[in-house]
Image (spheres, rainbow, N blue to C red):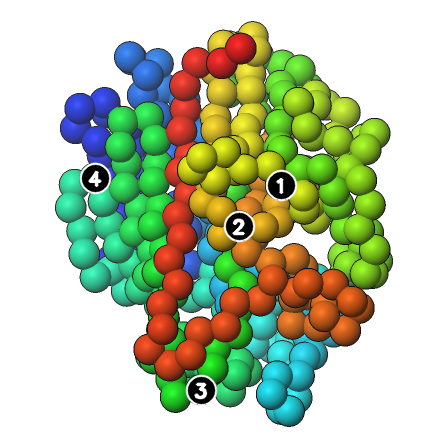
Amino acid sequence: MPHVKLTDADSGSSAIIAADLGFNCFEFVANLGGTEVDVLARQPEFPDEGGKPSWSGIPILFPFPNRIAAGKFTWEGTDYSLPKELVGYAGDNAIHGFCLDRPWRVTRQTASAVTGEFQLSVDDAERLPLWPADFKIELTYEVLGPALRADIKISNPDSKSLPFGFGTHPYFKLPLSPGSDAAKCIVDAPASTRYLLEDGIPTGEIVPAEGEFDLQGGAEFGSLKLDDVYGGLSYEEQGFVCSVMDPAAGLQVTQTCDASFRELVAFTPFWHSAVCLEPYTCPTDAMNIGDRGLDSGLRVLEPDEEFHTWFEIRVGPVVA
């Protein structure tokens, strides 16, 4: 089952998921009273004719989001080294986990919702020795009116402790209407600090998110050139909310993430007119960052324990 199309009968909104390539939701079109808004950017050839799995749609980043320095870490006295022939790399650093480039199994499906499952020992046994424990991740996508909802369950089927971080990598297309100017669109994120990076790896220093890095209250997309890890998130009742706005079209896309997400990566790719607002449960290089005096944010599941989280992407009119 390579692709799964979901449709909300009441609104006509739809989504398409590449079940055979990381369970990547590479298309979400929200229908607002007859106006269709195509939310996600992707490479023209993705997914059927190639393209990098991390460069389109909503890549799923697990068991680690972003980078592990030199692809090496130590857990409970055992050293691990992630080989380049089995794991994605950015320069000298392993990147974005084990799940975004492999087939997932569809376990449940309705007209508007689908659940995919990936278990390391079952679906990619070659990578099993590369992580301290086996893991299972289940993700349910559902189209609800002008919104795309994702519910995630991570579980430990092993007899050993499972360290992990989870993140997503959504590419939000700009502008939201063909007649608008992408440069005048607004990117907004409630993040007050950022991690200083060297070759994409946190140095151990956290500084205020100021000037060209400040997204609080909104910044024009045309002024941004980002690949940065943010912290100091402000939370509302349901979690934290970030958004992209197209003032000329009167439209905005909001992403709400529950409070288990502590960090946000903001990234402006050179290959799309898009911005990535990537919610993470931990910072980059969480497997090593404690050695630099920072709170790693790593989650650890003991055997048979579970972790649940969610996010929602919603299209609507600009809210003043």
- Examine the rendered structure and indicate whether residue 313 appears above or below residue 301: above
Residue 69 x %, y %: 73, 70
Which numbered marker is on residue 128? none
Compared across the picture, whether 26 is left or right of 132 comes to: left
Q: Which of pointers 4 and 1 indicates the residue nearer the eye?
A: 1
Q: Nearer the viewer, residue 200 or 14?
A: 200
The residue that disc 4 covers is 112
Name the image quarter holding the N terminus: bottom left
| Contact? badges 2 and 1 (CB < 8 Å) | yes
Q: Which of pointers 4 and 3 indicates the residue nearer the eye?
A: 3
CA distance for labels 4 and 1: 32 Å
Camera sees residue 307 = yes
Which numbered marker is on residue 261? 2
Residue 232 x %, y %: 67, 43
Q: Which of pointers 4 and 2 indicates the residue nearer the eye?
A: 2
CA distance for labels 2 and 1: 9 Å
User: Residue at horizontal 33%, vertical 16%?
Assistant: 32
- Examine the rendered structure and indicate whether residue 79 appears above or below residue 32: below
The residue that disc 1 covers is 233
CA distance for labels 4 and 2: 26 Å
Query: Which amino acid type is marked by label 1?
Result: Leu
User: Residue at horizontal 60%, vertical 58%?
Assistant: 282
Classify mark 1: helix, strand or loop. Answer: strand
Query: Of the residues under marks 2 and 1, which one precedes in the sequence?
Result: 1
- Examine the rendered structure and indicate whether residue 134 appears above or below residue 110: below
Compared across the picture, whether 24 is left or right of 280 comes to: left
Query: Of the residues under marks 4 and 3, which one precedes in the sequence?
Result: 4
Which numbered marker is on residue 160? 3
Classify mark 3: helix, strand or loop. Answer: loop
